[in-house]
Image: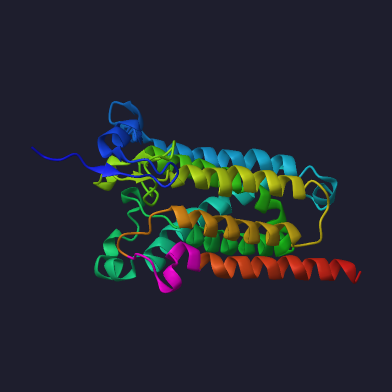
Amino acid sequence: MLAASWVRPAETGVWVPTSVIVRAMLIHPQFDPIAVAIGPLRVHWYGLTYLAAFTFFYLLATARVRRPWFAQHGWDRQRVEDLLFFGVLGVVLGGRLGYVLFYKPAYYLQHPGEILAVWQGGMAFHGGLLGVIAALAVFAWLRKRPFLEVADIVAPCVPMGLAAGRIGNFINGELWGRAADPSLPWAMVFPQSGTDLARHPSQLYQFGLEGVLLFALLWWYGRSQRPLGAVAGAFMFGYGLLRFTAEYFREPDSFLGLLALNMSMGQWLCVPMIALGALIWGVAQKNASQR
């Protein structure tokens, strides 16, 4: 007869059978990734989260350009629609190329035909950010507006789109968290991971931190007229800091693991974001004080 396995969670210090903890833990429901199926048409949840992200951006940016300090420079709904077009290109192309270059360059060097196969999965926020920055630069040049003015409009409108994306990650049961104390009330088993370990639902942490919290802070900060570039700098600093924190609860990519200083690739990519965001914000404040 096999002996029962026992564990002692740190919070309680009481020894209990692992079978009790496993039954008590939440289990990811393994949603069907297809939200709607009509004949041969398949609409995936992840695609719907992208639609939600772009819808959030359009609605929020349309509201934001009504601020007098933007409206007086000719910003209106038509410009927001044009900006959205550039933004979609930046997100999709930059996100995909960022994943290819930052996370699996060796693989895609051997399989170049799969680089554009976005339906197979594989998007990176930091690549998407670089893509959006490039798209905004082109838009600003074509519309003859300061780049930082465009970035200040966009920055508070992004986090709710990120929140939608994290919900998509959770529905797909991907990008799960690191192992958690099984007694944690919201610890969750992700069968997709191939183990029965209790894990942090890090997708939901990121939904709350990089999405809802960052949106609330930036929308509040952007209610008043700020120095040129200040809102964009606050976004970069805030996102970098919150993502860096959330990465401590997120399982590193299996093909990379932890890098130098026991930091994940996501954390290393956040370091320059934090530094650059602080620099942009500081320069914006200094320039405003000298006027």
Q: Is residue 14 left or right of residue 222?
A: left
Residue 35 place in picture, x, y as percent? 37, 30
Quarter of the image for the C terminus: give it. bottom right
Report x, y in % for residue 285. 81, 66
Q: Is residue 88 visible?
A: yes
Residue at 33% in and 61% down: 115
Q: Quadrant of residue 33?
A: top left
Residue 95 place in picture, x, y as percent:
46, 57
Check the image and report above or below for 283 versus 123. below
Residue 111: image location, x then y, percent:
25, 65
Pick out the residue farthest to the right: 291
Q: Residue furthest front?
A: 14
Q: In the figure, residue 265 lies in which quadrant?
A: bottom left
| Left or right of 169, for residue 230 | right
At 29% from the left and 71% from the top, the residue drawn is 106
Q: Residue furthest top?
A: 38
Residue located at (37% from left, 45% from top): 199
Type of colouring: rainbow
Give the residue at the far bottom of this rendering.
260
State yes or no: residue 87 in magenta: no
Q: Is residue 263 magenta?
A: yes
Which residue: 64% across, 61% down? 237
State the extent of the magenta-drawn residues as a range: 256-268
